[in-house]
Amino acid sequence: MFRKKDVFLITALFTIIFSCCSANPEIGQVTHGTPMEGDYLYVWDSILEVFSERNIPITTLDEEAGIISSDWIVISEKNNEYCDCGNGRVSPLDVVQAKFNIFLEFITEGSTGIQIAALYQLNNKICGSTGKFESDILLSLKNKMGSYRSEF
């Protein structure tokens, strides 16, 4: 039969696939191929620094494919800002885990596309993203890249 891990992976896959068909289009809108001003490697390095500054552990780094994936982390203090688990607000005492995937693509010289996907779970239940984490990462990335440019 199915192991717990298999069931979780299948559930996560279907959640990601069907989240594109959400009845609430404003949730997570910033995650769909946002263009960034900057060469691919410049954006890549900046993302790694943003993850490092936020102590987000990285499990997958595939520069050629443009994929950066985090390990599961606990985000208790940001529960209500970052995820929507359906039945009202999540208590600050609840342990919500999060995992993040970032996808980069070369658009043109000096322009790179970035897509951020956040996956949340509470008590083995998959929760939706509010888009706040994705917005925060994009803002941190833009600020970091802007500070790099002003140094030169």
Image: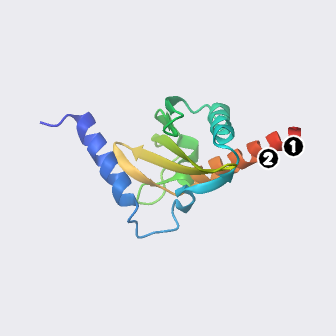
Where is residue 51 drawn, in percent x and y? 62, 35
Q: Which quadrant does the N terminus fall into?
A: top left
Where is residue 122 drawn, in percent x and y? 40, 45
Residue drawn 45% across the image and 69% down it: 24
Of 142 and 56, the residue lying toward us: 142
Where is residue 20 drawn, in percent x and y? 40, 61
List the residue tagged with mark 2. 146
Q: Secondary structure at mark 1?
A: helix
Left or right: residue 97 compared with residue 109: left
Type of the residue with mark 1: Ser
Left or right: residue 103 compared with residue 54: left
Residue drawn 36% across the image and 42% down it: 123
Q: Secondary structure at mark 2?
A: helix
Which dot marks residue 60?
A: none
Residue drawn 63% across the image and 42% down it: 40
Asked if the residues shown at circle 1 and circle 2 are in contact, with their CB atoms under 8 angstroms apart, the answer is yes
Of 103 and 29, the residue lying toward us: 103
* Number of marks drawn: 2
Residue drawn 66% across the image and 42% down it: 43
**Label 1 to label 2: alpha-carbon separation:** 6 Å
Label 2 CA crowd tier, 10 Å (few <14, some 14–19, many 20+): few
Where is residue 8 drawn, in percent x and y? 29, 41
Q: Which quadrant does the C terminus fall into?
A: top right
List the residue tagged with mark 1. 150
Of 85 and 43, the residue lying toward us: 43
